[in-house]
Image: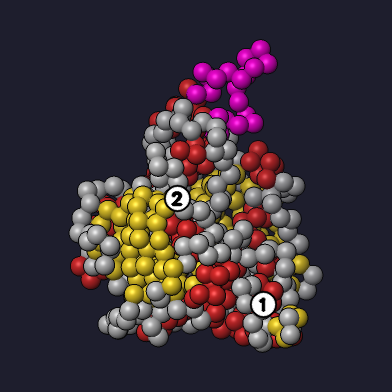
Amino acid sequence: MQCALQAVGINKKYGALVVNKDINLDIIAGEVHAVMGENGAGKSTLMGMLFGLIKPTGGTIKLKGKDVSFSSPLDAIAAGIGMVHQSFKLFMSLTVWENITFGSEPTSMGLIARRQARQRVLELARQHNLPIDPDATVGKLPIGMQQRVEILKALYRNADILILDEPTAVLSPSERDGLLATMRSLADNGKALVFVTHKLNEVMTVCDRVTVLRKGVVTERSLVRETTADEIVTAMTGREVSKHLDRPSANLGDDALVVEGLTVGPSSKPLVDGLSLTVRSGEIVGIAGVAGNGQTELANAITGIGEMASGRIRINGTDITALSVKQRRLTGLSFIPEDRHDVGSVWNMGADINVGMGSLEKAPQSRRGIVDRAALREKAKRLISAFSVAIAGPTTKVGNLSGGNLQKLIVARELDYGSPVLVVEQPTRGVDVGAIEYIHRVLLDERTNGKAILLISSELPEILALSDRILVMYEGKFVAELDPRRTDEREIGFYMAGAKEKGRSENAR
């Protein structure tokens, strides 16, 4: 088979920091090639070099056997390389066909040939079995369909090589299965796919080969059919990672978090529609749902970041409905937000300041109203070590971190705060398998220590492994309450898609 894209002895350094060292990677037409590694292993940097976002320090990139040098992603796109980013690059107010053809529209007499553009999109969708309404507004589409637009956008530009960066992170089970089937179909039709992911089950399901990075070097190259998930994990982490989570029986205490009749958004179409729920001390309540069904608005309303139209919220009996974000935190609430960049951190400040956020006024972070930077640095060092955050030092700006390492730093900060109630939103999104194991164990330890945890996650294995009760959310309402010991991903996915309401008491107890 033809080698479509090669990295030969690729190196990338930032000063004394070596991010990639002597990387060799062969991407073959007709295959799905997984690239795996822990956060900070160098995956994103390598993909950035292949797509023209980053200039290599040394080595060669070959396209169909010929040396190439990309000065920007436009060069890579022109050469037939497309990239579907984890954060979609779409215009939400434009239609599907406008997004797909943007910048490369067919024209007639100097004007965009709208009918021709729309027809090309329809033909492309049919050709690749990716049906979509070309006239739909992208911002109104489900996440899975928005991702389909991204793929079609690359294919419209004649991409023979597709780089997919964590493409299943926000998808429902049915959307995930549909994407994996699409990937397989594209490969079978001669496309070369690079699949960057942390999800071993997906690699074992759809991929032909896997390359594993650890600390910037390749530690394994294998045919998927000739390796195992355990061998891949060992190559990623350098150790064995336990798959078994010991979840002791819940020792339930009093009501810690109580939400009554919470509504967010206009009465004509609320984003959160009169929800009530209770989380008791020593309990993890998991909320499952496809992204965009009100989970983020629910979390923001509870924490005070977002507005609410009506309802009441109490923490350990104290009404916090009218309190500010800071006051809610002082009352006993910690929050791990979904948006780790704009909500969870200050990207242009150091790790020390970021781990101190929310507690800068407390000793030992401050003394007599003055921030103690030395104490902050020591705290940052402690949390960086405990969560294995790949960072140059405690004063390094967090904007330089990979998404997974930034997530680990935020999780470390919020768990270290010691609140009796935790709202935890997508705690392991984009996080490597070793860190997932650690975060899960810490959350279960917090539960054992009597914390009340509201867990919002699109990762159904995570919901099933950690939750004492599962609430499924659809279009702003809870449509099912399930016992994790008596359900599975298939049933949860059924309700996530909007199936008939099942098994909820009035206050989700």
Name the quadrant containing residue 240.
bottom left
Left or right for 180, reference 333: left
Local secondary structure at mark 2: loop
> In this figure, which residue is indicated by the disc labeled 2?
309
Q: Amino acid at mark 2?
A: Ala
Residue under the image location 36 percent in, 78 percent down: 281
Question: Which span of residues is magenta-colored?
Answer: 98-118
Q: Nearer the viewer, residue 423 or 445?
A: 423
The answer for how far apart the CA atoms under marks 1 and 2 are is 31 Å
**Disc ID at residue 360:** 1
Residue 112 is covered by the magenta coloring = yes
Any part of residue 288 in sight: yes
From the image, state whether disc 1 or disc 2 is nearer to you: 2
The mark nearer the N terminus, 1 or 2, is: 2
Q: Quadrant of the C terminus?
A: bottom left
Please tell me how crowded label 1 is: few (under 14), some (14-19), or many (20+) other residues with Cα within 10 Å: some
